[in-house]
Each structure stands twice: as C-alpha cells, then as structure tokens.
Image (cartoon, helix red, strand yellow):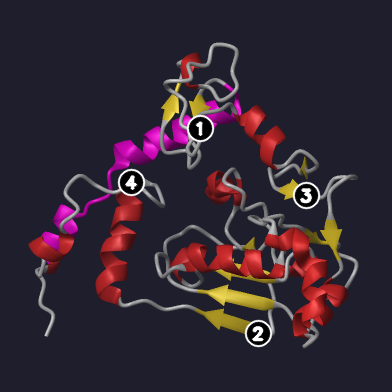
Amino acid sequence: MLKMNAAKVFRDLIPNENRMLFRKVGHTAFKMDLVLADKELNYFSTNPEYQLDGPSANADLINEKNPFELCSDRIARIMPTYDFDETGRAVLGPDSERVSFKWLKSVLSSTDLDLNNDLKWADEGEIRFLDGEEDLTGDRVSFSSWPRMGNTFLRSFLEKITGVFTGSDMDIKITWGEMQMGMLGNGHTSTGNNVWITKTHVPQTRAMGGGANPFECEKQICVVRNWIDAFPSYSTLIMTASHSMMPKNNNYHETHP
C-alpha cells in the first residue's frame, strides 16, 4: 500500500512563484522582440550571438536543435501564411493550406491504402486547419485528461496521423507558449469547425480558476495515467512552468516512497 506524508509532500512541492513570474515577464518581452527565446520558451537571452541566422550569430553558440530566435522570426519561420485574431490565436490567412473534413474522413476511413498518398503532406510533417466550411456536428471529439496524463504527447500523434491541428479550450493567453512551439490549434474548439479534436482539462481547469471556453462534442477520447507518476509530474509542471524542465532534486520516488 502506498503511504505518504501529505503535509511533507505539499511543503516540498510548493509552487515556485518566482519562476512563474519570470516566465510571464519572459513571454511578454519575447512577444515584443526584446529578447531571444529557445524552442520551448524555457530560456531567454539578450545576447545577439545566440540568435539563429542573426547578423551577429556565433556558430559555436548556436544549437540547431534548440535555437534562440526573436518572436517575429519564429512566426515567419513556422507560421508564415497565418494571420492572428484580436485574442492572439493563429487563424487561416489567404494563402494558408486547409483541408475539407468530409474529404479527410473519407480518406482516413477507407481501406484503400493508395489513398495514403493523398496525405503525403501530413507524413512530411505539415499540419493544417480544417477549412471550416462543414458543420462537424456528430463528429466533434473531446480529448479529455487531467494535466500530465500524456495529453500533449498524444495530441502530437493525433495531429501527425490526421494532418489536422487539434484544438484546446484553454485561454490562448495561457497556451500561447505552446502555440509558439507549433500547436497552432490552441484557442480553437470544434465549435468553430476549424479543428476536429479539442483538448480539455475540464473539470480541473475550472476547479483551479483557469477557466475554459465551452464547446460541444459527441465523442470523447480519455487518456489516463497512474497517479503515482502523474502527481509528481504535475507538481514539476507547476514548479517549473515548463513541459520539459526538471527540478534539481528530481528524486520524488526516493524521497517519498
């Protein structure tokens, strides 16, 4: 039977408010092109020698797998054809590639493997929005989980398989950083007919006061994970305000057996 000292756990895993504040300031400065940021917006710098393809770039300091760049350069690199609405969401621009849901559904449900060639662009890593011209009622999917259950990990698989961005009911102000990493469906729900599958952490988000944009669905994917692993993972997310960074003392299972 699992035993743990709850008081000790919560005392040891208290959120790092300074880290959260730093992230907010960093995001704001990045949006204004005042600082450079790495791929996952974990680190920020004002040193122009770190800038990918920058005029003062130092080849010895550039990490091609995790480059530092300005916000405007990143937008031009990963979302050159998209526009942005008043909330900050990425939306279809005049030259943005898009896909018909009716056509996509027919390809994915077909047993004719030759049709896979029609989705070659998805195999090559290109993800698109639905064209929004068809009512998705009857096919709208809610992708539900508690945070740190593997939601973002599985979202990336669903996008690569279908070739369509997944949405999120969370406010774009909260998920803007993920959008900068390529999840352009953040801020969209299937109610708008531009995304098919919508991520949600309800009721957790509402219980935590984070809010969630309401949407309707007829189908659901629910992903779960062992709470023994999910709890420390969620605590790490809160402490670091990052999906990939780890605290220095990453030995939860040893200190709280």
In the depicted structure, whether residue 89 falls above or below residue 143: above
First in sequence: mark 2 or mark 1? 1
Q: Main secondary structure of the magenta part?
A: helix
Amino acid type of the residue tagged 2 in the rendering:
Lys
Distance from label 2 to label 4 (Cα)? 33 Å
Q: Position of residue 104 (x, y in %)?
A: 81, 73
Label 3 residue SS: strand
Q: Residue at x 47, y 78 (%)?
A: 223
Q: Are dots 2 and 3 in contact, CB under 8 Å?
A: no
First in sequence: mark 3 or mark 1? 1
Q: Residues within 10 Å of mark 2 (few under 14, many from 20)?
A: few
Q: Is residue 86 magenta?
A: no
Distance from label 1 to label 4 (Cα)? 20 Å
Q: Which mark is residue 240?
A: 4
Please tell me whether mark 1 or mark 4 is closer to you in this view: 1
For mark 3, what is the residue?
91
Q: Residues within 10 Å of mark 1 (few under 14, many from 20)?
A: some
In the depicted structure, whether residue 63 falls above or below residue 138: above
For mark 2, what is the residue?
219
For mark 1, what is the residue?
67
Q: Residues within 10 Å of mark 3 (few under 14, many from 20)?
A: some
Label 4 residue SS: helix
Amino acid type of the residue tagged 4 in the rendering:
Thr
Amino acid type of the residue tagged 1 in the rendering:
Pro
Q: Residue at x 15, y 55 (%)?
A: 11
Q: Position of residue 4 (x, y in %)?
A: 11, 72
Q: Position of residue 88 (x, y in %)?
A: 68, 43
Q: Quadrant of the N terminus?
A: bottom left
In the depicted structure, whether residue 117 falls above or below residue 112: above
